[in-house]
Image: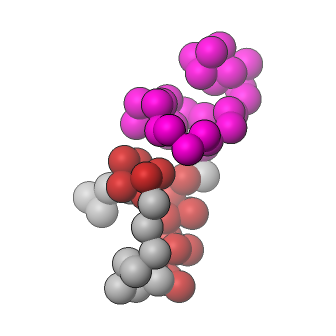
Amino acid sequence: MIDDAIALDGSFYMPYEIVATKEQFKAAYPNHNAFFETKAKYDPENRFTNKLWDKYYSSK
């Protein structure tokens, strides 16, 4: 289903269980880097995290 949403230039609801691959996440959310940059600006000590952050954020 995730691949079908991406094929239609869509995104998908990010449930509590993180099942999308990193590639699927990046394809469905092309502005993810802006989100990560904004979070780093307001949370430079990385105090607030969640499963999404743990799986998809890459500081590289």
Residue 23: tell me if it is visible: no
Q: Position of residue 47 (x, y in %)?
A: 40, 80
Q: Position of residue 6 (x, y in %)?
A: 63, 23
Query: Looking at the rendering, which quadrant does residue 12 occupy?
Result: top right
Q: Which residues are magenta?
A: 1-29
Q: Residue at x 72, y 29 (%)?
A: 10
Placement of 34 over or under 8, stated as above or below: below
Q: Is residue 58 left or right of residue 4?
A: left
Q: Is residue 8 left or right of residue 58?
A: right
Placement of 9 over or under 13, stated as above or below: above
Query: Looking at the rendering, which quadrant does residue 16 occupy?
Result: top right
Based on the picture, tell me whether residue 36 belongs to the magenta stretch: no
Based on the picture, tell me whether residue 14 belongs to the magenta stretch: yes
Q: Position of residue 54 (x, y in %)?
A: 36, 55
Placement of 46 over or under 10, stated as above or below: below
Placement of 41 over or under 4, stated as above or below: below
Q: Residue at x 54, y 33 (%)?
A: 27
Q: Which residue of the protein is positioned furthest toward the left in this rendering?
A: 60
Residue 12: tell me if it is visible: yes
Q: Is residue 54 left or right of residue 24?
A: left
Query: Looking at the rendering, which quadrant does residue 7 occupy?
Result: top right
Q: Residue at x 73, y 19 (%)?
A: 8
Looking at this view, is 44 or 31 the one in front? 44
* Labels in figure, total: 0
Q: Where, quadrant-wise, is the C terminus in this rendering?
A: bottom left
Q: Is residue 42 left or right of residue 9?
A: left
Q: Position of residue 44 (x, y in %)?
A: 40, 85
- Give the color scheme: rainbow, by chain, secondary structure or one colour: secondary structure
Looking at this view, is 59 or 50 the one in front? 50
Q: Where, quadrant-wise, is the N terminus in this rendering?
A: top right
Looking at this view, is 44 or 19 the one in front? 19
Q: Residue at x 35, y 85 (%)?
A: 45
